[in-house]
Image: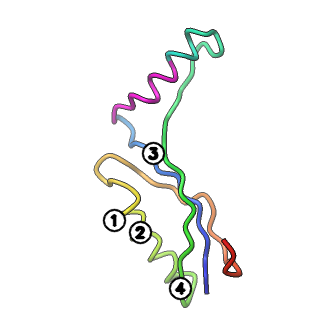
């Protein structure tokens, strides 16, 4: 069976985010927002195979930890996880 997951990877709390800071500066300078709280991250859409939902989730967790994120600096969150008909 194929499962599709949407994953968001962001920096852990306390890790400096220079891109987020740069966007905050622009928002303040232009007057678009007075007190922004911007965090920059990465979005992934991944399809994995698994005999069961648990196997697919385990495989996905391994992919997130070993390939998509740096566990020292980043955290990941699975935004959506669903059985798919094999269509991406």
Q: Give left or right: position of 23 versus 82.
A: left
Residue labelled with disc 1: 66
Which residue range is magenta in the image? Answer: 15-24
* Label 4 element class: loop
How far apart are the two marked residues, 1 and 3, measured between alpha carbons? 15 Å
Q: Are marks 1 and 2 in contact (CB under 8 Å)?
A: yes
Disc 2 and disc 3 in contact, CB within 8 angstroms: no
Give residue 54's position: percent from left, percent from top. 52, 81
Q: Residues within 10 Å of mark 1 (few under 14, many from 20)?
A: few
Cα separation, mark 2 vs mark 3, equals 15 Å
Instruction: State the SS at label 3.
Output: strand
CB within 8 Å, label 4 to label 2: no
Which residue position holds label 2? Answer: 63
Tell me what residue is drawn at x 55 percent, y 67 percent: 46
Where residue 62 sits in the image (x, y, percent)? 39, 71
Residue occupying image coordinates x 63% and y 62%: 80
Disc 1 element: helix
Write down the residue under mark 3: 10
Quadrant where the image shows the N terminus:
bottom right
Tell whether label 4 touches label 1 (CB within 8 Å). Answer: no
Q: Left of 25 or right of it: where is 73?
A: left
Give the numbered dot on residue 50. Answer: 4
Q: Which mark sits nearer the N-terminus, 4 or 3? A: 3
């Amino acid at each position: 069976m194929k499962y599709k997951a949407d994953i968001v990877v962001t920096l852990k709390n306390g890790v400096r985010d220079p891109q987020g800071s740069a966007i905050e500066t622009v928002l303040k300078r232009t007057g678009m927002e007075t007190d922004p709280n911007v965090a920059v991250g990465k979005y992934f859409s991944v399809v994995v195979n698994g005999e069961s939902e648990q196997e697919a989730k385990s495989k996905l967790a391994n992919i997130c930890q070993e390939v998509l994120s740096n566990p020292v600096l980043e955290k990941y969150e699975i935004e959506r996880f669903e059985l798919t008909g094999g269509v991406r």
